[in-house]
Amino acid sequence: MTTGVANSADRQPQAAADSSRIGLIVPSSNITMETELPELFRRQSLATGHRYTFHSARATLKSVTREELLAMVDKAADCAVAVSDADVDVIAYACLVAVMAQGAGAHVGSETVIREAAADNGLPAAVTSSAGALVRTLEAIGARKVAMVAPYMKPLTKMVGDYIEGAGFTVVDATSLEVSDNLAVGCLDPRNLPAIARELQHSEADALILSACVQMPSLDAVQAVEDELGLPVITAATATTFEILQALGHQPAISNAGRLLEGSLVAADARTR
């Protein structure tokens, strides 16, 4: 599998051998990635003994509109420089829709901008983005048709669907929760997701994207929805976590977050290819 992330063995991290530093670039109003990712990596630590710390830079975003999203993108390089000052091993650009708003395949360019900014700062790091991680993870698990849940207004949900289809997949059904305020998105109750997922037309889907947004909480529902529907369930957060682990060269060993992060959905040789 070809990914946009480089293995951390390609550089000499300054963190201790039994720990890794993860840099995040997040929207200023995001309250989810800095809760869901640390929880996922806490579970990874319990299974492996390896420790992870998180170091964030923020870019202004209050409303999920195309204009604000594109303005946030302009700050990516400055955020990359700021977070690379912590000498992180990997940087995750954690705003899926901001990247997708730029058009098909935009994650490649966004990841390059961040990678080059960190390198120019003298502190190179592996780089992923939630947008790139989502489409690459769908490829890694062999999904071709997907159903998805998104918190956005319908035009933005369509834009996300078009982006995913532009990467070679088919979106068989999508639900828009139509919440435009990004802080409000972060307050949505993940306990509602099983019922929402149940209503999707998913009989032809190979996988379900339970949250096509880094801000919409979903972690507490991933395992329950996967167990009920019998489909692989991924989210923007779990796909990002998967690629961070890839970049670090670590085997996924995370419990109660779906087969992807349990380590049973993607063969080990595919993860390291």
Image (spheres, rainbow, N blue to C red):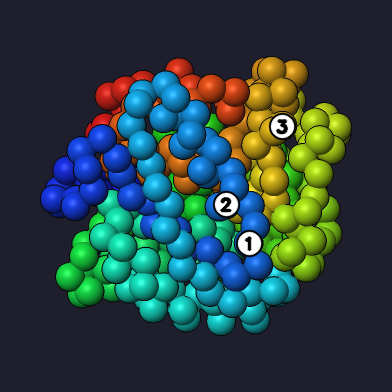
The three-letter code of the residue at mark 3 reads: Ala
Instruction: Point out residue 206 in the picture as x, y percentages from the top left corner.
Output: 60, 28
The three-letter code of the residue at mark 1 reads: Asn
Dot in front, 1 or 3: 1
Residue drawn at x 42%, y 21% is 47
Q: Which element carries disc 1, helix, strand or loop?
A: loop
Residue 114 visible (yes or no): no
Residue extending farthest front: 16
Left or right position of 269 against 184: left
- CA gap between label 1 and label 3 equals 19 Å
Q: Which mark is residue 30?
A: 1
Q: Which of marks 1 and 3 is nearer the N terminus?
A: 1
Q: Which element carries disc 3, helix, strand or loop?
A: helix
Q: Kindly indicate whether the residue at mark 2 contacts the one at mark 1 (C-beta within 8 angstroms).
A: yes
Residue drawn at x 46%, y 79% is 75
- Mark 2 lies on residue: 33
- CA gap between label 1 and label 2 equals 7 Å
Crowd band around label 1 with a 10 angstrom C-alpha radius: few (<14), some (14–19), many (20+): many
28 or 67, which lies in front? 28
- Mark 3 lies on residue: 221
Q: Which of marks 3 and 2 is nearer the N terminus?
A: 2
Left or right position of 70 against 110: right
